[in-house]
Amino acid sequence: MLPGVPANAGFYPVAFVGSVFLTLFVTFFARESGEAKAQTSSAFRSFQSTYLHVFWLMMAGDWLQGPYVYALYKSYGYEQADIAVLFVAGFGSSMVFGTFIGSMADRFGRKKFALLYVVTYVASCLTKHYSTFYVLMVGRVLGGISTSLLFSVFEAWLVSEHNSRGYSGAWLGGTFSSGQFGNSLVAIIAGLVAQPLADMSKLTPVSPGSALHFGGYTAPFDLSIGVLTVGGLLIMCSWSENSTGNAGEPPCSVTSLRAALQLILSNRAVLYAGAMQSLFEGSMYTFVFMWTPVLTEPAPAPPPPFGLIFATFMVMSMCGSSAFTILSKANAPASFMPMVFFAAAGGLAMPVFFESSKRACLAGMLVMEFCCGMYFPAMYTIKSKVVPEESRAAIYNLFRVPLNIIVLVVLLTDMPRSVTFSCCVVMLTLAALVAKALQRVTRTTAVQYELGNLLGAGQEQAAVEQP
């Protein structure tokens, strides 16, 4: 039995141990089945390391906060309705500011906006020390802005810098896979570190009646500030700036937004990639909100080991990222994405058809996490190939608008769990069909590209042979 887990915790320790062994096997096979690292250059590996260390620190700053936001609000005495308003403010902020913050990053520099992420997230963490509702609301708005930056600017910087340095496009998949694998590991470490830190002292006002607090659930946010600051210093010292737009344009230019939107609507590959992201990640965030009540209602005795369950999820995500490494060595990511989406739909169908069986529900959730591990490096690779460089961060943020709408609908409605998960199954099935359409588009484009090369070569040869 695992330390700290009740003897009657049931099948959760078995699921964790099984996930660990499966992940070790798949990861070992991924490392042994190819020699991708040997084919890269030392300069590329140094560049890759520069990006990954920053990315993992930024994600660690996010993971340290996630499990404690709701608990902190509850400790301040807020009811579920008030907390829901705060969460809606965060996702709404991400949706609204995300529509133009990406275009600003493209024009004024992605390094600058990566540093802006650090500043806004640190400020959001500082607001957590105040129990005043409107201060917490400001923190949620800042957190929404930070989320928009985290999931667009860093990826856009990497792809642009990778291409500008002339590295092989085939090497990007390895960076994305390593990033997702390390991200899952960082999430586990963050959970192990943050919990004892939060338990070290009680949440206490600095003086009787003061809105300013310290200790308790604010401690993980303080650690996050430190981690984000270190990441910001690394960005300042080791990242170069890249931008593609005209810095002379006014900020929040409607023209820039219109151009990015027109690129999405006029390019079927870009449109399909955005639809896949919105449908999958909308389902994923819904799953994140819903897994706890699925495993706790009706209330079991004793309560399930949440820390162990979360660790199992992350281990399965690591397994998925290793599986991506294996598959991507011989297949383009677009070729196996329909399979990933269909598998995820099957996983989230378990709470619909077997809601009373906690074992069946957990098994389906583990399949979903495995698919998440495969999805992120695959999706990053697809977007790096189909999204135009001149509006990369802007388009990445526009992709997130529909998924934020999906999450807001889930937060603002009170649908039965079976209906909610049924909607997720439908969205994931649609994502699989869109992925099939993307396959056809990319295959046609590749054929046209090769045909163009052949015709061009033929014309050049004819010109040479002319007297």
Image: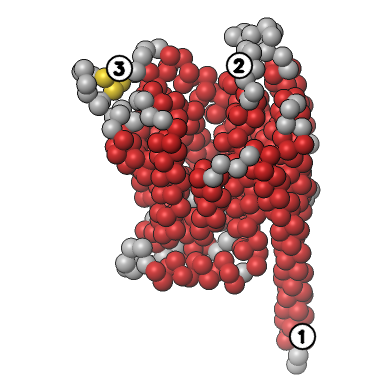
Q: Quadrant of the C terminus?
A: bottom right
Does residue 388 lie above or below 42 as drawn? below
Across and down, in percent, residue 459 comes to 74, 83
Which numbered circle lies on residue 296? none
State which mark lies toward you, 1 or 3: 3
The total number of labels drawn is: 3
Q: Secondary structure at mark 2?
A: loop
Q: Identify which residue is drawn at 34% across, 18% down.
A: 203
Residue hosting label 1: 462
Q: Which residue is mark 3?
A: 204
Q: Earlier in the sequence, mark 2 or mark 3?
A: 3
Residue at the spot x=60%, y=28% of the render? 292
| Type of amino acid under label 2 | Pro
Of 155 and 432, which appears nearest the observer? Answer: 432
Report the residue marked by disc 2: 303
Q: Which residue is at 72% across, 66% downward? A: 441
Query: Circle 2: is it few (<14), some (14-19), or many (20+) Cα within 10 Å?
Result: few
Q: Quadrant of residue 140?
A: top left
